Image (spheres, coloured by chain):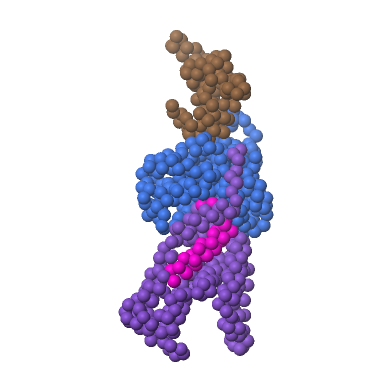
Amino acid sequence: MHVHLDGTTPIYIQIAEWLQHEIIADRLQADEKVYSQYQLAELFNINPATAGKGLTILLEEQLLYKKRGLGMFVATDAKERILMKRRNEILTKMAQEIVLEAKRLLVSDEELLVLIRKTQEGLA
Amino acid sequence: MNIIQCEELSKSFGRRHALQRVTCAIDAEKIIGIIGRNGAGKSTLLNIFAGYIKPTTGSCKVFNENPFNNIQTAANMIFIDDRLSFSDYLSLEDILKMGADFYPNWQNELAYRMLDYAGIDLTAKHQQLSKGQLATFNLVYGLVSRCALTILDEPMNGMDEVIRTDFYRAILKEYLAFPRTFLITSHHLQEMESILEEILLMDEGSVIAHAPLDEFKEQLISLSGPSDALADLLSETEVYAQKIMAGMTSAIIDASKLFVSEEILRAKGITVSSLNASEVCKYLTSKKGSDIDAIFD
Amino acid sequence: MQSLTNISLKTIVIKQVKWKAKLYISALSSLVIVQIIFGILTFGSGSGSSGSGQGSLNVQFSNYSLDMILIISAIWAFIVALLFTTKAHRIDDLSVISSRTSSAIANIFVIIIYSFFAVIIMISTYYLQALGIALAEKNSLVIDNLFISPSILILCFSSICLFGAMGLLLGTIFKGPAVIKIFVSMFILLGLILIFMSPGSINLLPIIMLSNLMISVLYLFVAVLCFSLTIRIADKSEVSRK
């Protein structure tokens, strides 16, 4: 059980990411109870308020839901939604970087598209 | 709920102004780091909270009462620092017995287990302990007393790194087991950062920031990129530190005063990075434009 | 929110007295040692050492030795009380639940308890000395009054208590707020000036002429005054481990 808590990314975001990772890897199943903020605090040696903030992020994104008095549970469609979100976010960011780098290297738009197509064929 | 409330609190020792018009409130059941350079007024503030000294002007309420010479404050507060001392006639075991006699929430068995873990001999005398053992014993004494307000002034001074890591965890576990307010000062912010909920930053006798840890860290950001691209941006905002080297500039600025999106910055070749808590403390408390490099120029 | 602990001043004072009385028990043993040393010294110097020469030599000796023991005990009480107010003790008090008020009251009680024990030690020393002299001189007439009257016991207790109280007050004054320090220094200075300017103005004769019991009451009254001043000043004193 280890997450590298580096100094610059806020800890609560790292906790949210770790939980999402656990959901993708099926270690936290749909409708299963997730760790409480106190368990997370103990697990990662962090303040429970920080752990709570991480859980709140997922709650706001409706990846978790609350049962009164019982704690938080994984939403039924959490896994698909995380995968979808990651696809969008990560690919958009990577595409941005490719376009920027191409500009810096004076690669024309056509050349870039050709390159992408070629890469796709190569991997297929 | 607030357990401490200070209004316009000042304290002078002769001509020296140790605290100047401090207004702050401390919530119950939080672990709060009190950070500041040497002489920033941390100890003076903590001594007022503990009821050891009187404010010169202004007011301070702890548990809704004036803490000075107040037995109710004393019964619910413990102040641990490296000057904690006990009579020469007491062995450590006797000290634990005495603690158990005074403090109603005392955990004697836990004290034995922790001291055994740290390899401290209970038949020893308090003043015979090495610096690290002394700090460990004092911290254990503070933890097992389970006071609603636990003040730890540089609790890890003199401990080696392994024990320090263990005892930050011990503080956290004790907090989870028995929630209470911890006020911890330390020069090793990075080590204890993860267990903190809030930071209270002091400089020259004033509280200059008091916020949840993440908010605190996010108030400053670092920008670096080509000097000409950054020049305009920096002229419009408050710059905490700036370094120019070979046409590249890196600067620390107030995040709330940056109105340009990260995408636009990236397009200009400027990278944005966040800082860790101790860097933010450093930049907020250092004199504007002062830099050790300047001495050697 | 965890409920706060509610402890009365009385409970804390009792706990503090218990621990302090136990911890500084060595102060009492130091009194025993000092008295034994003085006992041996006066014993060695013989019974004729006092010289005012009124009444019989034997009676004079027994008075002389109890006075000596009392003076030693009073000085001892003063020093012990002064030690109670030193920084080391004050800082030790901060390690447990205490306030300046509770610590001052606890110190007062410990001084009273120790004064009581000091009287017992005094009496034992006195009888031991008498026994020693009786054995050494083989003269049963040396001691003609082995019975110490209760009024003398009360006088001993009250004088030891008074000196203890003065020690506490003095120690507390010099740890207290600057205003009080200045005030007391002025007071002492004025007193000294008065004594030197007109030595005749202070007449101690009426006090000396009083009965033992009256002197005791007077002493205890002054002691109580010192005690209450001690508490008052302690209430206003700041304390710090630095």
Please report the bounds of the magenta region as a residue range. C96-123
Q: Residue at x 59, y 76 (%)?
A: C214
- Residue C112 on the magenta segment: yes
Q: Main secondary structure of the magenta part?
A: helix
Where is residue B58 shown, x and y percent of the image? 68, 54
**Residue ID at (46%, 75%):** C147
The percent position of residue B250, horizontal first and vertical second, equals 53, 40
Q: Which chain is brown?
A: A
Q: Position of residue A28 (x, y in %)?
A: 50, 18
* Quarter of the image that includes the N terminus of chain B: top right
- Residue B65 drawn at (x, y percent): 65, 50
Image height of A27 relative to B58, above or below: above
Identify which residue, B42 or C80, lies in the foreground.
Answer: C80
Shade representing chain B: blue
Any part of residue B39 in sight = no
Q: Is C215 drawn above or below residue B43 in the view shown?
A: below
Q: Colour of chain C?
A: purple
Q: Could you say which is closer to the camera, residue B129 or residue B216?
A: B129
The residue closer to the viewer here, C148 or C52, is C148
**Residue A34 among magenta residues:** no
Q: Residue at x 57, y 14 (%)?
A: A77
Name the residue: 64% across, 59% down: B56
Q: Which residue is the extreme one toward the bottom?
A: C53
A107 up-or-down from B247: above or below: above
The mark tally for this picture is 0
